């Protein structure tokens, strides 16, 4: 991988962006960190090389130091920083926050450059991955030959000691397990009972290095454990006391500035740790025994923070897994783009379950939850184990509540309680004697828990909370409460109607619960009247939220929502919102076709567009001052113009502009983002623009940004805002193209941000960059637009780009500096 990474760095040095990324994924023990450091060493005279220390959490301070390093020596001596992030994977938002702070710092210092400010080399340890840039535990023939040459040099310099170079010898043997087996012969025989304290300590190291590669213990903790019954051996060094196991351990000092000289102890290689653990379990010393003893022997109050993190990692960290049939599937692009699935539990808990019993999993998680009695994630994991594996919903509920008590403001912790009740609701129907009353009792608990979670999620994101000491704000909005509510509502509908189809009329609000109970007195569910009468309205509200959420955004630029997400949302909505009767109002028709919202119209099916536009025109004529109706009516015309430009239903551009102008003049600074989007689409400068009293587009862009922050920022803050329309050559409404009319591969190329990209049918427009802001130029006027990649704006000058529109405003894609 050395040449691969070097080549990627060389390519990134030529890029026009100020910040670029190179990812190196590596399996534990394959030498990924060593490779990354070797690259930094070899490039130290060409680039300014640095590494972020593992304990750093202040991305703002890091950004400041990086830009200082880049600028050192003055404008004539600027040089790109090659910055290593070595397995800082416990903070998933670290890299994103760092990039945001780097952009801010570059702007604040007014850095002008023709080379990248920083190339971030992100070294990530992963157990299983299908990524192409992965360092695996396998050698090429060239690497084997080079290692043999190195072995000869080591033997010459170190003699017989070369057999103790375990990590090197494992690599030399191409990671063959037999090499590890040979190294670990010193562990024979292992006793189940009356093991020495050094053998017990070795077991703890083997456990944490197997399930949290790279973790370690401090010598102080090791020494205290050994000294408890050392018979006066405390004056001896740790290396001496751990004989004959010292050769398979590594004692090393950190080089971090604030902790320099602090020692750590770990196994010499993850494969040695795994072999050691395997030998222990074969001798009857199980994983659960080792884990519970570790919690008893090493976790004396106060438990060191690093050890708390290690215990949480081995007991709660769930790996991302790949479907068994993914390698056989042809739609590789779908696999790449969708979110990976998480394992149900940590690897350690899954192994204890598979090799021991579910009872031992419970004991381990319970011991950890009681030992670390302030941590919410351990009781959360225990609650999940109870409801998923044991189907013990009462205990699951109790431990989920314990987790909430430990962190009441954390919405993700609250989600577990809702999941307990939802899964209980699912499994109720396996009991053939389950009554509607039982379904509604559990359904009420589930929906209320998810409502509480959704409320907590909104508070986590609210900007006003930042001024009240809220430091633990999630980087992304937690939508699980809203989604979980829909799942619970779907289950309630399915199981009630399965018992009696008349329930569907109650849930769809076609008849009142009281009317139903009079005709079916046996049901006796009067106490759930409030739930029954509110479900449809709540389903509609949450469906409308997801229409906006899923239409305007996606998880990231290269990742789509899981394929099941939108269909499940629509499935629940379809059950509750099915209008009956021969005479349906226009609004009822729109709701049934799932186009009653602005976002829903953006993906309306072609055959329905003329009917939809007619229905919206009818609503507009009935309520000409209703801004929401006007917005949908105008959007329907825009969408129809994209699909059928000669449709007789279409209204002229001038008529649509006149309607919108009236609303603009009435209250132009307090409208929705959707309203401002329509102003941009209808009035964006071209030859057919209505000149007289037309909206000020630059002013509209500013209003739209404020409106977005007020309306959607909390929900979409970490997500990629998808372009809804692009500008193309043409006049009137034909100057626009809806994203659905552009080939998906072209959209992907636009998103990648390569300035050399040429997209047929789209128009590159001209503008300029000034003070790190991008402006679209029409005549003598400039309209500020947001760069899709802020790092692509690195100096002043004339630029060209593709112009797109998302729900936040106009966006410059694929910015190219013109010579």
Image (cartoon, rainbow, N blue to C red):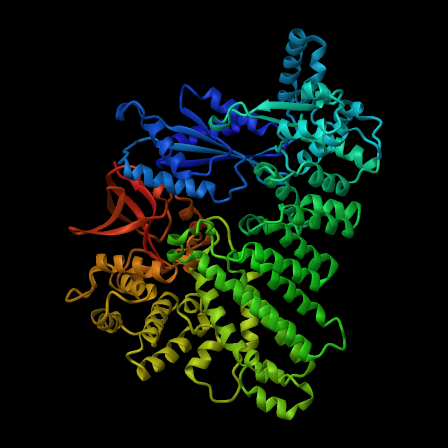
Using the rendered view, name the quadrant where residue 25 is placed: top right
Side of 547 where 703 appears, left or right: left
Query: Which residue is painted at 39% across and 53% down in the image?
Result: 466
Q: Nearer the viewer, residue 4 or 360?
A: 360
* Tally of numbered discs: 0
Which sits in the foreground, 445 or 156? 445
- Name of the residue lying farthest toward the bottom: 518
Q: Is residue 194 above or below residue 533?
A: above
Residue 294 in percent (x, y) is at 71, 38
Q: Where does the C terminus fall, quadrant-wise?
A: top left
Q: Is residue 309 visible?
A: yes
Occupied quadrant, residue 686 = bottom left
* Position of residue 11 in the picture relative to residue 217 (left or right): left
Direction top: furthest residue:
156
Of residues 7 and 756, the one drawn nearer to the viewer in this rendering? 7
Please report the residue visible at 47 percent of the width from the left and 26 percent of the height from the top: 257
Horizontal and vertical percent for residue 551?
44, 61
Q: Residue 166 appears at what percent x and percent y? A: 69, 21
Residue 660 percent coordinates (x, y): 26, 71
Location of residue 722 (image quadrant): bottom left
Q: Residue at x 47, y 89 (%)?
A: 583
- Position of 111 with respect to 260 (left or right) is left
**In this rendering, position of residue 637 left or right of residue 92:** left
State whether residue 636 is above or below residue 15.
below
Q: Quadrant of the N terminus?
A: top right
Give the vertical position of 60 relative to 392 (above or below): above
**Is residue 754 at least partly visible in the picture?**
no
């Amino acid at each position: 991988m050395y040449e691969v990474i070097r080549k990627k760095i060389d390519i990134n040095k030529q890029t026009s962006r100020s910040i670029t990324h190179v990812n190196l994924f590596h399996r534990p023990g394959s030498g990924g960190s060593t490779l990354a450091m070797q690259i930094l060493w070899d490039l130290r005279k060409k680039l300014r090389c640095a590494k972020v220390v593992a304990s750093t959490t202040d991305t703002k301070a890091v950004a400041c130091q990086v830009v200082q390093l880049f600028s050192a020596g003055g404008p004539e001596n600027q040089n790109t920083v090659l910055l290593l992030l070595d397995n800082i994977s416990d903070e998933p938002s670290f890299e994103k926050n760092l990039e945001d702070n780097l952009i801010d710092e570059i702007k604040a210092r007014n850095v002008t450059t023709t080379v990248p400010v920083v190339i971030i080399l992100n070294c990530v340890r992963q157990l299983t991955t299908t990524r192409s840039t992965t360092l695996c535990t396998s050698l090429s023939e060239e690497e084997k030959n080079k290692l043999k040459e190195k072995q000869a040099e080591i033997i010459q310099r170190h003699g017989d000691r070369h057999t103790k170079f375990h990590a090197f010898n494992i690599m030399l043997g191409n990671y063959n397990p037999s090499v590890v087996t040979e190294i670990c012969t010193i562990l024979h025989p292992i006793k189940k009972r009356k093991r020495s304290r050094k053998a017990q300590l070795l077991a703890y190291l083997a456990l944490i290095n197997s399930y949290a590669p790279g973790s370690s213990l401090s010598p102080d903790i090791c020494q205290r454990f050994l000294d408890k019954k050392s018979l006066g051996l405390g004056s001896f060094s740790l290396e001496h006391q751990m004989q004959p196991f010292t050769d398979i351990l590594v004692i090393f000092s950190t080089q971090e500035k604030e902790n320099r000289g602090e020692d750590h102890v770990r196994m010499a290689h993850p494969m040695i740790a795994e072999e050691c653990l395997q030998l222990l379990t074969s001798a009857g010393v199980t994983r659960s025994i080792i884990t519970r003893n570790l919690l008893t022997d090493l976790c004396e109050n106060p438990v060191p923070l690093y050890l708390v993190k290690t215990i949480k990692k081995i007991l709660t960290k769930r790996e991302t897994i790949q479907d068994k049939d993914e390698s056989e599937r042809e739609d590789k692009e779908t696999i790449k783009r969708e979110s990976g699935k998480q394992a149900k539990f940590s690897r350690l808990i899954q192994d204890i379950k598979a090799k021991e019993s579910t009872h031992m999993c419970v004991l381990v998680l319970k011991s950890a939850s009681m030992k670390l009695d302030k941590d919410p994630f351990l009781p959360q994991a225990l609650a999940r184990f109870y409801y998923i594996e044991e189907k013990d919903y009462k205990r699951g509920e109790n431990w989920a509540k314990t987790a909430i008590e430990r962190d009441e403001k954390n919405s993700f912790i609250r989600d577990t309680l809702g999941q307990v009740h939802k899964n209980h609701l699912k499994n109720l129907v396996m009991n053939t004697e389950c009554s509607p009353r039982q379904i509604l009792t559990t359904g009420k608990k589930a929906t209320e828990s998810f409502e509480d979670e959704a409320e907590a999620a909104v508070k986590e994101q609210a900007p006003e909370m930042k001024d009240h000491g809220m430091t633990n704000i999630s980087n992304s909005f937690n939508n699980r409460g809203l989604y979980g509510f829909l799942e619970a509502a779907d289950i309630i509908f399915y199981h009630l109607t399965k018992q009696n189809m008349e329930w569907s009329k109650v849930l769809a609000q076609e008849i009142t619960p009281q009317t139903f109970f009079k005709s079916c007195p046996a049901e006796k569910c009067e106490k759930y009247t409030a739930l029954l009468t509110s479900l449809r309205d709540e389903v509609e509200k949450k469906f409308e939220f997801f229409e906006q959420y899923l239409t305007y955004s996606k998880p990231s630029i290269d990742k789509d929502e899981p394929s099941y997400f939108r269909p499940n949302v629509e499935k629940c909505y379809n059950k509750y919102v099915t209008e009956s009767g021969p005479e349906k109002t226009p609004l009822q028709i729109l709701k049934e076709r799932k186009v009653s919202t602005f976002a829903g119209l953006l993906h309306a099916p072609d055959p329905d567009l003329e009917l939809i536009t007619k229905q919206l025109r009818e609503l507009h004529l009935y309520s000409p001052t209703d801004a929401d109706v006007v917005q949908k009516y105008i959007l329907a015309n825009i969408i129809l113009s994209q699909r059928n430009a000669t449709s007789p239903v279409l209204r002229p551009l001038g008529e649509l502009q006149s309607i919108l102008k009236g609303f603009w003049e009435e209250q132009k600074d307090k409208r929705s983002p959707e309203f401002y989007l329509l102003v941009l689409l209808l009035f964006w400068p071209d030859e057919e623009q209505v000149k007289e009293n037309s909206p000020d587009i630059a002013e509209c862009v500013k209003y739209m940004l404020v409106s977005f922050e007020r309306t959607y920022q909390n929900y979409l803050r970490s997500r990629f805002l998808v372009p809804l329309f692009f500008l193309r050559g043409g006049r009137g409404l034909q100057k626009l193209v809806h994203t659905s009319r552009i080939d998906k591969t072209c959209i992907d190329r636009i998103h990648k941000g390569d300035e050399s990209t040429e997209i047929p049918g789209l128009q590159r427009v001209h503008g300029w960059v000034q003070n790190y802001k991008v402006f679209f130029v029409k005549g003598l006027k400039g309209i500020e637009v947001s760069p899709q990649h802020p790092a692509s704006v690195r100096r002043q000058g004339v630029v060209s780009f593709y112009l797109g529109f998302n729900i936040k405003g106009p966006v410059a894609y694929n910015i190219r500096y013109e010579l």
